[in-house]
Image (spheres, rainbow, N blue to C red):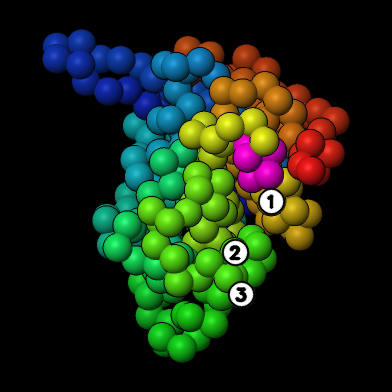
């Protein structure tokens, strides 16, 4: 599903250059649930931006579902993002003046899905995350955990090939974090490929594989025995 070969990325810092990614190689098969870990400055945000087509590598290759991702203008990058990817962010990134249903339906609007079909799909995905009865509520009427559930429903509504979750539990307490990870595990159980960027060990072990980044290189890539979040959800 994802193939990264010899990926390099540097940023200009005045007259100097900061080499952030130093020849990364890894692949992710369809249906995997992978945690990307690393301290601040390890390169995980840069990697996620490249995977999310928000930035481009200086050299190396990135292939997504058999499609080489390179030399994309903003229009093509946006088209590929809509086709391939769903995003979940630490800060939820919901639009405050739109209801839960309208937020979930937004990716479908950009895909030019007719309004009635958008609303039906949005309700379906809200139901899957347990928030159908909250469909007409605005984000400021929702708890942090509910906002993240809406964000996950929005990410899934366009039925992406890969879900990219950037610190999805970072703004949540432990109990709510485990509820969100239970939801992510259930989505993965249905065959969806998911990448979770996290700095939390317990969250990483709720994935099936952990990739550790340090100073722009992969220092460890191991499969782990998955801890099911459901056991912590009362």
Q: In this view, does 1 lie above or below 229?
A: below
Mark 3 Cα shell of 10 Å, populated few (<14), some (14-19), many (≥20) = some
Q: Does the magenta stretch include residue 60?
A: no
Category of crowding for the residue at label 1, using alpha-carbon neighbours closer than 10 angstroms: few (below 14), some (14–19), many (at least 20)? some
- Name the residue beneath numbered marker 1: 183
Name the residue rendered at 61%, 23% in the picture: 200
Residue toward you, 109 or 2: 109
Would residue 60 be found to the left or right of residue 183 on screen?
Answer: left
Magenta: main secondary structure: helix
Q: How far is disc 2 from disc 3 in space, using C-alphas?
A: 10 Å
Q: Can you identify the residue that label 3 sits on? A: 124
Among the 4 quarters of the image, the one containing residue 181:
top right
Q: What element carries label 2?
A: loop
Classify residue 124 as left or right of residue 74: right
Quadrant of the image for the C terminus?
Answer: top right
Residue under the image location 79 percent in, 29 percent down = 223
Q: Where is residue 185 in the image (x, y as percent from the top left)?
A: 73, 47
Please, what secondary structure does the residue beneath circle 3 have? Answer: helix
The residue furthest front is 141
Return the x and y of residue 83 as percentages of the image width and height: 48, 65
Q: Where is residue 232 in the image (x, y as percent from the top left)?
A: 79, 36
Instruction: Report the magenta residues as a range.
Output: 176-180
**Residue at (27, 56) in percent of width and height:** 74
Q: Kindly report the distance in space between the C-alpha atoms of the residues bearing marks 1 and 3.
A: 15 Å
Indicate which disc residue 131 carries.
2
Percent coordinates x, y for residue 124 in the rendering: 61, 75
Q: Which of marks 2 and 1 is nearer the N terminus?
A: 2
Between disc 2 and disc 1, the foreground one is 2
């Amino acid at each position: 599903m994802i193939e990264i070969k010899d990926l390099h990325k540097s940023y200009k810092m005045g007259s100097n250059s900061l080499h952030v990614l130093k020849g990364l190689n890894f692949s992710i098969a369809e249906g995997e649930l992978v945690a990307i870990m690393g301290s601040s400055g390890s390169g995980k945000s840069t990697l996620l931006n490249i995977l999310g087509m928000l930035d481009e590598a200086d050299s190396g290759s990135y292939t997504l579902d058999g499609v080489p991702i390179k030399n994309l203008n903003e229009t093509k990058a946006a088209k590929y993002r809509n086709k391939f990817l769903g995003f979940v962010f630490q800060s939820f990134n919901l639009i405050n003046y739109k209801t839960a249903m309208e937020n979930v339906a937004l990716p479908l609007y950009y895909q030019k899905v007719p309004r009635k079909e958008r609303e039906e799909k949005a309700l379906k995905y809200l139901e899957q995350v347990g928030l159908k009865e909250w469909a007409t509520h605005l984000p400021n009427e929702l708890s942090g955990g509910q906002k993240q559930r809406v964000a996950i429903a929005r990410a899934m509504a366009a039925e992406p090939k890969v879900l990219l979750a950037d610190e999805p539990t970072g703004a949540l307490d432990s109990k709510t974090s485990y509820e969100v990870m239970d939801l992510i595990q259930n989505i993965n159980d249905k065959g969806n490929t998911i990448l979770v960027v996290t700095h939390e060990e317990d969250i990483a072990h709720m994935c099936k594989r952990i990739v550790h980044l340090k100073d722009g290189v992969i220092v460890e890539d191991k499969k782990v025995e998955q801890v099911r979040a459901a056991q912590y959800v009362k």
